[in-house]
Amino acid sequence: MTGAPVEVLLDRATVLTMNPDQPILNDGWVGISDGRIAAVGSGDAPPAAQVLDCSGDLVMSGFVNAHAHLLGAFVRGMGGDRTTTVDAGPDRPTVAVRLVMDEEDAYAAARLALVEMQLSGVTAMTDSQPALRGHEPQADGTLRALTESAMGAVFYRASVDRTDFFPDSTHDTTELASAEVARLTDTYRTDRLRVGIEPMALHRVTDGMLADLIDLAHERHVPLAIHGPYGESAAAHAHERWGRSVVGVLEDCGALGPDLLVHHPVVLDPGDISVLVDTDTATSVCTV
């Protein structure tokens, strides 16, 4: 046995390290102390308070789910015949369920989604949750579940104030967004969990809300996200409203950069892609 003692040892595993040269350790081990990986190697392993025999198992870095809707766990299979377009209305089953969920419902839905992710090897994720005025406890239920999961996560509070997708009575305001982001950050932020800001999509927010939320994210130094041009209608809306692509509008607003995550930007031209690369803007692209 070699090396400094560790608390937990995953021993005799096939370890896929994910290092740049991608070595695979066929007789490998992973040492863990204080909840963090302390050492990785093969052959003789360090002494440990707890040893787990991982013979026949593959040990690798956890997957990252870069875009999820945790509360969607309760609406799977509903409304699959309806595409998400700019003019989608509030009659969608997914919206109807959201309007009746309380904090405990949100907690249960988020726990279900998180357990399924962990069972598939996901250890970090981002959640985009539309912020419905009058339904603020849903965020508390979701963040409670995220905290208990011990996963790494960014929870994006997604504002809407210009859409028929959700009833007008649930539309957000800049003042409420500012207060809620501060409350949720003070209540739930840890070294593994952050609360971010999201103008849900360009076609679902007013110009004022878009500018205010971008400024708020920069002032608070919190992560920023937005749903990108995920279909032809979303891409066309930006051109009709501003004469620019979605990426172009975000560039004009000063939103692009490494602190921004653009969810599934599907409809892009080469110029948009170059701008995203040049500004080091993060994207999460669905594979379907």
Image (tube, grey):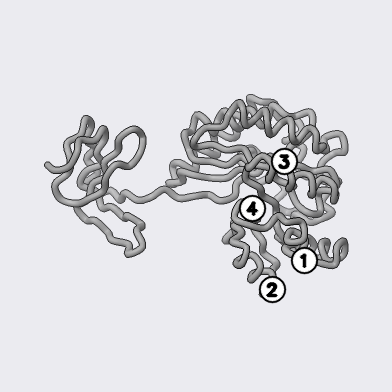
Callout 3: helix, strand or loop?
strand
Q: Is residue 193 left or right of residue 63?
A: right
Q: Is residue 172 visible?
A: no
Callout 1: helix, strand or loop?
loop
Q: Is residue 220 left or right of residue 13?
A: right
The relative height of residue 281 versus residue 45 in the rendered view (above or below) is below
Q: Residue at x 65, y 44 (%)?
A: 128
According to the picture, the residue beneath numbered tag 2 turns out to be 271
Q: Callout 1: few (<14), some (14-19), or many (20+) C-alpha neighbours within 10 Å?
A: many
According to the picture, the residue beneath numbered tag 1 turns out to be 245
Place of residue 239 in the rendered image (x, y in percent of width and height, measured from the top left): 83, 66
Q: Is residue 71 visible?
A: yes
Extreme-front residue of the structure:
219
According to the picture, the residue beneath numbered tag 3 turns out to be 130
Q: Callout 4: few (<14), some (14-19), or many (20+) C-alpha neighbours within 10 Å?
A: many
Extreme-bottom residue of the structure:
270
Place of residue 157 in the rendered image (x, y in percent of width and height, measured from the top left): 68, 39
According to the picture, the residue beneath numbered tag 4 turns out to be 260
Callout 2: helix, strand or loop?
helix
